Image: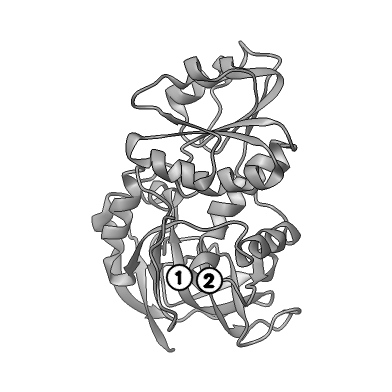
Amino acid sequence: MKKMKAIRVYEFGDTEQLKYEEIDIPVPKDEEVLIKVYYAGVLPIDFKIRQGKFGKRKFPYTPGIAASGVIEEIGKDVVGFKVGEAVFGRTKRGAYKEYATIPIKNLNHKPKQLTFEDAATITAGAEAAWEALFSKGELKEGQRVLIHGASGGVGQFAVQLAKWKGSEVIGTASSKNQTFLKKLGVDQAIDYTAKSFEKEVAKVDLVVDLIGGDTQNKSWSVIKPGGKLVSLIDIDETAAEDYPLVTAIFSQASPTLEELDKLSDLMANGTIKSGIGAIFPLNQVREATKKCETRHGRGRILLKISGHEKSRINVF
């Protein structure tokens, strides 16, 4: 068997559990492709799984769900894709490695104008924002939306997509990210370290909650009757019961492949931009993960694993 470099986790714990090793290159199943991974997204869900916050896990495993790259091999039942094509998608068997398998039901072609690094920010980043705003939040032109954590890996896309839809956008972030919010296009930027957002905002149609906890609990009162709160963290059901005229939705779903094609086209033509805060080589995965764990970054964090494309760090 041919070998590849990969990150392996053998037990729950801190970043010391991320082991840089050499393992066999996987073989794609019938409806999968094998890609040479160019970039992998470093996501909050990755470290939460490693910390044991999502129940049992079969060890050892490779972290990561978001990847972009080029198809190296296809399974026997694969249609619509061929060897050599540039793609991006969601893998269930780890993205922090040189080669990864992805089911074609979770795979999209990468537009020619879209970089591999931007493509790697779509899964659980831009796609999560799309799902929260449109599929679950049903945001419409002219409505008002409040986005918590608006400068982060999901929030940056939520702001831009909401503006593209023609909505009024209010975003919360720390002091250091206020200028970034304005570059993203928010109509009202709120520094949550200096002001109580619930005293600054009222009668919004939708809250996109990327923070949870006390921030969510304070959000119910600013939503007008008939409005919605969509959280990617969780829903405090007890608090929600006090606001029966507000619809509470917990979302971890993904858009359809057709919606992802639309989203990637918007990124390829420059309508939506991807803020990338840091890029690390695979063997510096611990440093990348520690930066992600602070939850105070700006834009997406990536691992560069293969490819000749010149990387960029750009947060507008």
| Residue 273 placement (x, y as % from top left) | 54, 58
Q: Residue at x 42, y 48 (%)?
A: 44
Residue 151 seen in render: no
Residue 5, by quadrant, is bottom left
Q: How many marks?
A: 2
Task: Examine the rendered structure and indicate whether residue 146 appears above or below residue 66.
Answer: above
Mark 2 and mark 1: Cα distance apart in space:
5 Å
Asked if marks 2 and 1 touch (Cβ < 8 Å), the reply is yes
Q: Residue at x 54, y 62 (%)?
A: 92
**Which residue is tagged 1?**
39
Task: Examine the rendered structure and indicate whether residue 231 appears above or below residue 203.
Answer: below
Q: Residue at x 54, y 20 (%)?
A: 201
**Which residue is tagged 2?**
68
| Residue 87 placement (x, y as % from top left) | 60, 74
Local crowd size for mark 2, using a 10 Å CA cut-off: few (<14), some (14–19), many (≥20): many
In primary-sequence order, the first of circles 2 and 1 is 1
Q: Amino acid at mark 2?
A: Ser
Q: Residue at x 66, y 58 (%)?
A: 263
Q: Quadrant of the N terminus?
A: bottom left
In-front residue for pair 66/170: 170
